[in-house]
């Protein structure tokens, strides 16, 4: 695509390179550095005037740095006279701050999406945001990619031996979708989080026979691993055999992976929206490239 250029941000995690190859477009790597006073600096080293500019920048930690770099790239592209700006944001930061839980709090994800549109983004492509409905705050076109089929491809087992488990009520839709693709059964547990301490407790459980089953626990994000670990421990205590954790975004802070392994989880599967050297990562680039070709 001669009229399209792909710009790789510092947090593209190889996705920009793959996408540029798949849509047959030029790839540009930005120049970036941190100035002595701590400010971010970026420069697009090649002309992009009158081009459709696809900026690839995931917003994993450090989120604020990556957001600032994204805004700077957008402004640089506009300064060149870009025809159109499309954002590929594989991991959308602040998606869990989607409501005012306590008085005086901002709705952070809505603010971020408004800023991105106001600064020139006409389209945003993201992968499995925490609450898809939050994307309505983006006034342009948006595309949400769900990697469930990729997880199913990575788990090639006899469906009679598998149970898909949602570790909380919010993950039930993902569990239903995965179980439908795998042609197997699903169930779920409910959790309750103490907002003061962050501690998680299982509140209620839908009865199910886990005996000798391979259990696939699926969610959108794994951060501390506590939710996954508790669900895995419950499955194991009720007779489960192998337990696999699958989540789109693997933040896995601190000793998260070690905690999950200690709970009986044998495999941790995610996507390359976020770098992670302790898990199996599935490349999401093909689905992103397809969305770009359909959306332009």
Image: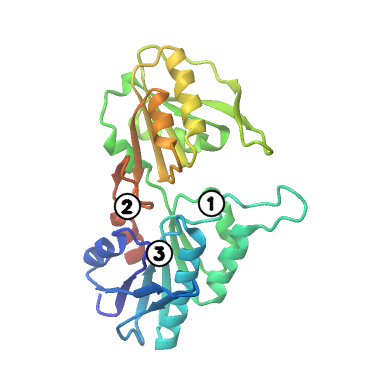
Q: Callout 1: helix, strand or loop?
A: helix
> What whole-number distance in Å separates the C-alpha atoms at marks 3 and 1?
19 Å
Position in image of residue 133 (x %, y %): 58, 53
Nearest the camera: 156 or 26? 26
| Residue occupying image coordinates x 29% and y 46% | 282
Is the residue under label 2 in contact with that under label 3 (CB below 8 Å)?
no
Is the residue under label 1 in contact with that under label 3 (CB below 8 Å)?
no
Say which quarter of the image contains residue 144.
bottom left
Q: Callout 3: helix, strand or loop?
A: loop
Q: Callout 2: helix, strand or loop?
A: loop
| Residue occupying image coordinates x 49% and y 51% | 129
Query: Disc 3 designates what residue?
Result: 57
Query: Disc 1 designates what residue?
Result: 132
Is the residue marked by circle 2 packed among few (<14), some (14-19), or many (20+) residues within 10 Å?
many
Q: Is residue 187 visible?
A: no
Circle nearer the N terminus (3, 1): 3
Is the residue under label 1 in contact with that under label 2 (CB below 8 Å)?
no
Position in image of residue 173 (x %, y %): 50, 37
């Amino acid at each position: 695509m001669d009229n399209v250029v792909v710009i790789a941000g510092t947090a593209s995690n190889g996705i920009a390179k793959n996408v540029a190859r798949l849509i047959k477009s030029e790839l540009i790597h930005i120049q970036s550095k941190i100035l002595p006073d701590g400010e971010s600096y970026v420069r697009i080293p090649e002309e992009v005037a009158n081009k459709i500019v696809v900026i690839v920048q995931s917003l994993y930690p450090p989120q604020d740095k990556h957001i600032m770099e994204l805004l700077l790239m957008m402004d640089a592209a506009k300064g060149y006279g870009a025809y159109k700006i499309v954002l590929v944001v594989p991991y959308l930061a602040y998606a869990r701050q989607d409501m005012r839980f306590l008085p005086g709090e901002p709705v952070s994800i809505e603010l971020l999406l408004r800023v991105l549109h106001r600064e020139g983004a006409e389209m945003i492509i993201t992968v499995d945001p925490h609450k898809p409905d939050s994307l309505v705050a983006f006034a342009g076109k948006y595309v949400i990619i769900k990697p469930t089929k990729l997880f199913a491809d990575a788990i090639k087992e006899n469906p009679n031996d598998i149970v898909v488990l949602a570790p909380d009520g919010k993950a039930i839709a993902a569990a239903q979708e995965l179980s439908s693709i795998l042609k197997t059964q699903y169930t779920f547990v409910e959790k309750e989080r103490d907002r003061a301490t962050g501690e998680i407790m299982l509140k209620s459980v839908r009865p199910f026979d886990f005996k000798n089953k391979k259990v696939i626990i699926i969610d959108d994000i794994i951060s501390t691993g506590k939710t996954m670990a508790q669900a895995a421990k419950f499955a194991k205590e009720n007779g489960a055999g192998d337990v696999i954790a699958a989540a789109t975004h693997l933040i896995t802070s601190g000793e998260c992976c070690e905690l999950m392994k200690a709970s009986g989880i044998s495999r941790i599967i995610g996507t390359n929206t976020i770098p992670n050297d302790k898990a199996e990562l599935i490349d999401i680039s093909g689905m992103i490239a397809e969305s770009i070709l359909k959306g332009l």
